[in-house]
Image (cartoon, rainbow, N blue to C red):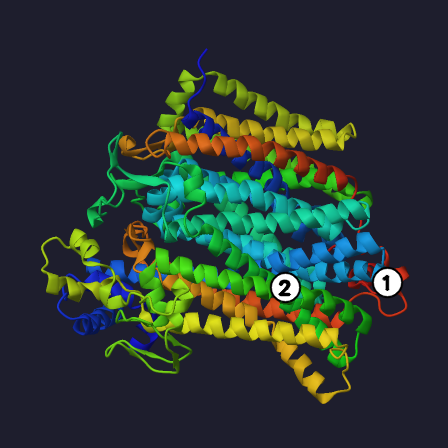
Amino acid sequence: MHLPDLNTVWFLLVGVLFTGYAILDGFDLGVGILHLFVKKDHDRRLLLNSIGPVWDGNEVWLVTGGGALFAAFPGAYATVFSGFYNAFMLLLVALIFRAVAIEFRSKETGKTWRLAWDIAFSLGSFLAALLIGVAMGNITRGIPLNAEGDYAGTFIGLLNPYSVLLGLTVVALFAMHGAIYLVLKTEGDLQAEIRGWVPKLISLFLALFILFNVATFFECSNLVSVMKERPYGFVVLLLDIAIALSIPKIIRSGNEFGAFLASCLTMVLLMAVLGISYFPNLVISHPDVASSLTVYNVASSQKTLANMLVIAVIGVPIVLAYTASIYWIFRGKTRIGHVGY
Amino acid sequence: MARFLSPLDSQFRSTTCSITSQSPTLSRNVEYMTFFYCITLKNNDSLCSVMNVEILSRIQFSLTAAFHYIYPPMTIGLGVLLVLMEGLYIKTKNPLFHHLAHFWTKIFGLVFAIGVATGIVMEFEFGTNWAAYSRFVGDIFGSALAAEGIFAFFLESGFLALLLFGWDKVGPKMHFFSTCMVALGAHFSAVWIIVANSWMQTPAGYHLEKIVGSVHTPIPAGYVVQAEDVGHVRAVVDNFWDMVLNPSTIDRLTHTVLGAWLTGSFLIISISAWYLLKGKHKQFAKASITVAVVFAAFTSVLQMISADSTARSVVKNQPIKLAAMEGIYKTEDATPLTLFGTVDTTTQTVSGPKIPGLLSFLCFHDFKTPVVGLNDLPDDAFLSARHPDLSKEQLASVRPTYWPMVNATFQLYHIMIIVGSALFGIAFLALILLRKGLLFRTDLPAIRAFLWLLVFSVLGPQIANQAGWFTAELGRQPWIVYNLLRTSHGLSRAVEANQVVFSIILFALIYILLFITFIYLLNKKIQHGPVDDEGHHTKALGVDSEDIFSKQARA
């Protein structure tokens, strides 16, 4: 057995960071998407406080994922970020608004003030989830690249139906994930209400997800042919759907934490399927496949990949250890105390 | 239009130098005309659109970076002071210090949120607006940025949860530990981003390589990167620690962090002075201002030492920048220091009071040694490597295209120096008054006037920070990576001018809204004041009777 090369290792590590982002920021974006559906002011504050201590730590996974992509595969980082210029600027706006909305919202008692920041928080969360999905949809589908490796399409071209479908799927996925998180963090009437949403959100997600897979079959011939060579990918995919389907049952059994873990696992497997069907590509060029960016043609030098691996091996376990401890300290039902939103 | 453009003109010069290499003045006029033409007639000529995207991307980056940089210095500085205050609480068990930490933590939380929200923009912008630059430096700059994420941001944001929300969840020692970790994270963040930026100022520990297909060929040192190399040549790390500890890292890191400490100190000094003037929260304000004044005085001494060392490192590493900062054109023995004034770039003279030989002394610790002026920088060897077919006279005429905007760099630098020196004086005057027991004598008109000065002193470090960074970044032009990659070669080719205009307008509007809201909420927190006051300290442990949230919880 031979060890994977550094480029493959970094493909995995960047994947791990973005998966971490999806799992963690996924639930707080989901809470944001559901925020306006909760009507009482006290309940909205509970929602904000449930993610209060952790949301910015969660967002760091995006920042670090972006940094790791920049460090390991600068060519892919440069192409995607400059190519998706307008979309990423809107994503930034969405992330800024939801971040400050969390901080600002409960600092004033006025109805208009709170409603304005509630809308900013919810809309920002929705837009962020949608744009992340649309960006991923375009990556899955492939984007037109020129010989220099630059994006050669238009902004409107990014809003193709296939990518928008994945955008909506991600919104549904995060809303589902957020609802399951809230079941874990709330109690009483609010919990009962949210608990009622979970099966509906799971159905919505699965319907969109299956539709997306069918669309992928017709739209992305490259991925389909890769998947045929890697049949274990289909096993992962089916396992993923099975786990998502089992979540309502786990919740009914009263195992709220188990349900949340199952939801996390759904996202891990989803990212795994994407990774399996995509490797070794980072950005597939469509229609000119020869210009695709791969882990080999846009990577940093072996020396940098090795240096970065040392940094990751030292840093990541420490990060995981204290992140887990902090989640442990803030475990249990959220209550509104003298510190918080 | 020309007035508006003047701080940004060096890039036009570099872009148009090939057309008008005869005279800098002529070339400048042509630049303005070209730019004006581009803007008004929406000309799609490639030169124009590159110039537009470049100037717009620079405006966008400076706007978003300058706005972002209002906040991190406050969190870095407040972080250290929170460690001090909570440390004093752990040591003395005096609940007053617990009060202090609790109140300033709330201010910290508000500042931190905006710092995070505006910081993500910075990381995105390297890729969105400077894609060619990102490809060129990814091997080096990317690793510093990723290290910042792993070592700094996670630490900072993770323990922030305990700092802000953990007062009742963990014991005082664990809370103190979290405060230390947040402060440490903020400093790590400074370390890695300054490493990255310093490498752009003084690149080290790398070589260039050419990429053709899948073949990577090392390029010997001294190679001049051409426009057509963009996308095919990149910098690759040779030695990680040489890269990290490049010649300017330590000086610039020290200088920046000390600037941040002063920013945090003067924030506390300002708010506390206001409480003293209003006769509110006296005991709290006295304790806060004492900690902050002592710390500010200590920091400003270190900052003077660091400033001296930083300036001497600039002389050595970036002599053009230093010459621009001081407006030196002619190389003369016993170079004088101009205290303030204006640079006339046409006559190449500086108005204003001068101290003979002082600049030589500050640069070389010797009153005689000449400071090399812009008319000899960059030297002929450097220029002829880039313009092999030009004669010696012609080289002299292209030389100015390698200068930054001299007057702007001079002014920004002098603003930093003047404000910095004033802060040094204010901090020491405050310390002396404190020692003499006069600082709290609000019945004395002179003390009241001084306290009002302290209230406004919060702006000082902010002005100095911004002016200092603009000096550093404008003074580096026309290079994005010093002497290696031109700013104009670092742009995203997939991005058009209208897209950048759209995002600038978007950010400008949002940042105005954010800033107004921030000031409003900060003011509200200040008006609301610390939770408890004289005589009620013991009650405050873990119970905030006046907390606005608990009030709403009851409602």
Coordinates of residue B515 in the picture (x, y in percent): 56, 67
Mark 2 vs 1, N-terminal side: 2
The residue at which mark 1 appears reads as B545
> Which residue does the image show at 63% across and 80% down from the upper left?
B453
Crowding at mark 2 (Cα within 10 Å: few <14, some 14-19, many 20+): some
> Which residue does the image show at 69% across and 33% down from the upper left?
A260
Coordinates of residue B119 in the picture (x, y in percent): 52, 54
**Residue A134 seen in the current view:** no
Crowding at mark 1 (Cα within 10 Å: few <14, some 14-19, many 20+): some
Coordinates of residue A341 in the picture (x, y in percent): 72, 56
Coordinates of residue A135 in the picture (x, y in percent): 44, 42
Cα gap from disc 2 to disc 1, whole angstroms:
36 Å
When the figure is inspected, residue B269 is found, relative to residue A288, above or below; the finding is below
Give the numbered dot on residue B298.
2
**Dot 1: element:** loop
When the figure is inspected, residue B265 is found, relative to residue B453, above or below; the finding is above
Please identify the quarter of the rendering in which residue B540 is found: bottom right
Give the numbered dot on residue B117.
none
Q: Nearer the viewer, residue A324 or A187?
A: A324
Disc 2 marks a residue whose amino acid type is: Phe
Chain identifier of the residue bearing label 1 in the image: B
